Image (spheres, rainbow, N blue to C red):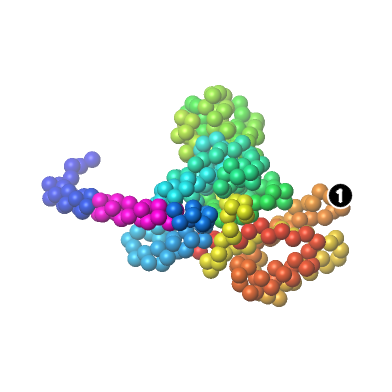
Amino acid sequence: MAPTAPGRESEIAVLREQIDALDAEMLVLVNRRASVAQAIGELKRADGSPAFRPDREAAVIDGLKARNAGPLPGESVAPIWREIMSACRALETPTRVAYLGPAGTFSELAALGYFGSSIVKLLCANADEVFHATSAGAADFGVVPVENSSEGVVTRSLDLFLTTPLIIVGETSLYVRHNLLRKVDSSDGIVAVCAHPQALAQCHAWLSHHLPGVERRPVASNAEGARLASLDPSLAGIASDRAASEFGLHLVAPAIQDDAHNRTRFAVVAHPDAQPQPKATGHDCTSLVVSVPNRPGAVHDMLVPLKVHGVSMTRFESRPARSGQWEYYFYVDLQGHPDQPEVAAALAELREVSSFFKLLGTYPVDSH
């Protein structure tokens, strides 16, 4: 590499001094913000208000994005301020978040991306434990995968909404980049590939082409597969870059997912007694689960209130009710918030024609 010209070095030195001065100013401002957050925390504790409000933080980030004049890209604003808000929130009350462990899972990446890194982590063995920890109050929030762009819904997460009191208060999504990880830097001699069943399905074509005949071993999480691979050189895991670093593994093959645009959507769940329903932000989603009588035209009748009141449906999934009567639960996402008259009217009419109706939550979604 050619050395930097003396004139350029002096220019860079001057600019670096400016950056150092700006960093010092920002540190002062961030600490001033932290002091105000502490004062807010004391008031919240006095009246029992929750420290984390998804709608409030969404409004803050939306406002900053709207005022951003560059050159910082708009998509960089949210993660920067989430970390600042996370650190300030921790001064009020540490936020306890349950998600699928061990360290290095995509659920962990989703949790850190949504809440920031200044949280108390509760690593769980499966989705059932995430729901239990959050229902019992051991965690303030849980983060669970609910849908993948290539493999569809995560059925266990959906089923657990029926048997627990938890509601959805937020959502986040990740581009899921699967990597083949191993203790040795080679794909020769792999006896089994260990990963979550969803990851194995999302990499089916690649595995069939590059590792035909190799056992695909389902485990509780991708990070667990990486952990097993770190203990046995005959095994490989499918997991994130973070898991490779966490367990000291070689990245034998990057981005082996069959869909280059593979995304997973995660729900942020909480107990309704501890976390109020987020207020309307102008870009909200309302999730519910319903069942209708097993008779001709029942599903049509369920959809009529949405059409009449002009409410858009963004997701519609069915799950068997396991009653032996060929009955189904329908998981529905609607665009809007119950505070909007048209949404409230549609929900009221939908409740009337349903044999089962449960509002799973209303929460802000990313508007950009």
Which region of the structure is painted magenta? 22-41
Task: Write down the quadrant of residue 99 in the picture.
Answer: top right
Percent position of residue 199, x then y: 60, 41
Is residue 332 shown left or right of residue 229? Answer: right
On the question of residue 76 being in view, the answer is: no
Viewport quadrant of the N terminus: top left
Percent position of residue 60, x then y: 44, 62
Magenta-drawn stretch contains 195: no
Taking the spot 44% from the left edge, 53% from the top edge, the residue there is 42
Q: Main secondary structure of the magenta part?
A: helix
Taking the spot 26% from the left edge, 54% from the top edge, the residue there is 25
Circle 1 residue: 324
Magenta-drawn stretch contains 31: yes
In this view, the residue in front, 311 or 91, is 91
Taking the spot 57% from the left edge, 28% from the top edge, the residue there is 228
In the image, residue 71 above or below residue 19? below
On the question of residue 355 being in view, the answer is: yes
Asked which secondary structure carries label 1, the reply is loop
In this view, the residue in front, 345 or 102, is 345
